[in-house]
Image (cartoon, helix red, strand yellow):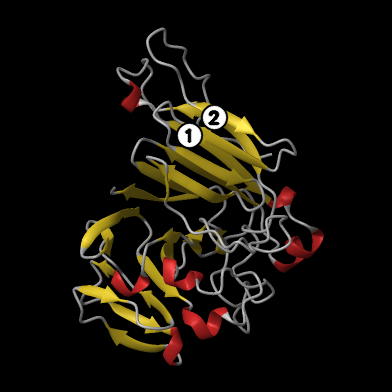
């Protein structure tokens, strides 16, 4: 069992305003939180993967119609949690025995509880409402094969906070064993967009990146607004966390991403050719309506000594 640094308190009742609602699915495989103003988030316990986030009745996240939701593989869409490895495993070292993108996205997490905003007082208006869902994963949740591949004792707390226009996802990693370890973390956000040909990403100009579509060649971004032309898979390094990364549609802001301790940003769209070889991607032209902008700690792997913790987060604002 993972110990929470902050225990959830009961959602206070207000005579003036109703409180957020949290519902479990019939088979207890997912949790949905809904604000009094209608915003909602749905989280699958397999991978603690967010598979839906709606504001003003509009879906913000792309979810493949062929996505596998039973935990046998990572979910194609939403916001999968990538830990302790991003990408394919290296040929040697402590991460070499892991499968691609590690194990966090395919493990069943524990639901630790729900809480309201940090304020101890009742909300002053309906728009002040927010709700946090906490999930935990530890070495005890892993299969014997996973523990053999990564034999460290750890604890993860993943918190999903829904407010009227924002979605915050934060992660705490704790070394609960006697050995130090390194790891990578990435929040693999799939945004739902109208048209990839009219979508751009800002705040990356001047940043070095590895171009995975060009044999991992290191390049420097020269565009103020990065457009997507065919398959795109870029790992931008040391992106200033003081400046939000923005996704624009028709040159107008659609999403704003603020990051803490997630200094790298992956921009990915598979394009039509790669999609044809992906069995869990659908519809086949869905690549035109999705874009991944994924904050992570990748190039400079965090390292934890016994008893140490590491925290990171992203806050996504939906601009409607």
Q: Residue at x 43, y 38 (%)?
A: 162
Report the side of 74 relative to 286 (left or right). Answer: right
Q: Circle 1 sits on which residue?
A: 132
Residue 158, visible in the rendered structure: yes
Secondary structure under the numbered disc 2 in the rendered image: strand
Q: Residue at x 47, y 25 (%)?
A: 20
Is residue 59 positioned above or below 57 on the image? below
> How far apart in space, not on screen, are marks 1 and 2 (Cα)?
6 Å
Report the side of 56 relative to 81 (left or right). Answer: left
Secondary structure under the numbered disc 1 in the rendered image: strand
Circles 1 and 2: CB distance less than 8 Å?
yes
Is residue 225 positioned above or below 179 on the image? below
Q: Nearer the viewer, residue 132 or 50?
A: 50
Q: Quadrant of residue 181?
A: bottom right
**Whole-percent x and y of residue 92?**
63, 82
**Whole-percent x and y of residue 22?**
56, 29
Q: Nearer the viewer, residue 253 or 246?
A: 253
The label on residue 114 is 2
């Amino acid at each position: 069992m993972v110990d929470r640094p902050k225990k959830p308190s009961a959602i206070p009742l207000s005579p003036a305003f109703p409180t957020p609602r949290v519902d479990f699915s019939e088979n207890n495989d997912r949790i949905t939180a809904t604000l009094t103003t209608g915003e909602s988030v749905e989280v699958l316990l397999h991978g603690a993967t967010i598979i839906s986030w709606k504001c003003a009745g509009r879906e913000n996240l792309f979810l493949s119609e062929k996505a596998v939701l039973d935990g046998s593989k990572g979910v194609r869409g939403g916001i999968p949690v990538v830990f302790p490895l991003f990408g394919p495993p290296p040929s040697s070292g402590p991460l070499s025995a892991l499968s691609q993108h590690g194990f966090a996205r395919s493990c069943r997490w524990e639901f630790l509880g729900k809480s309201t905003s940090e304020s101890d007082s009742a909300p002053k208006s309906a728009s002040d409402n927010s709700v946090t869902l906490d999930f935990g994963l530890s070495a005890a949740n892993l299969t014997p094969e996973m523990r053999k591949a990564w034999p460290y004792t750890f604890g993860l707390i993943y918190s999903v906070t829904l407010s009227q226009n924002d979605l915050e996802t934060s992660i705490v990693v704790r070394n609960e064993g006697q050995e130090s370890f390194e790891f990578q973390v990435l929040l693999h956000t799939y945004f739902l967009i109208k048209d990839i040909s009219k979508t751009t990403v800002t705040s990356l100009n001047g940043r070095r990146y590895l171009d995975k579509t060009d044999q991992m060649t290191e390049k420097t971004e020269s565009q103020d607004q990065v457009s997507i032309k065919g398959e795109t898979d870029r790992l931008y390094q040391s992106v200033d966390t003081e400046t939000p990364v923005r996704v624009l549609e028709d040159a107008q802001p659609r999403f704003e991403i603020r990051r803490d301790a997630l200094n790298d940003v992956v921009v990915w769209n598979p394009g039509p050719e790669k999609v044809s070889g992906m069995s869990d991607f659908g519809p086949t032209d869905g690549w035109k309506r999705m874009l991944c902008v994924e904050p992570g700690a990748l190039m400079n792997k965090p390292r934890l000594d016994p008893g140490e913790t590491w925290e990171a987060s992203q806050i996504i604002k939906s601009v409607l």
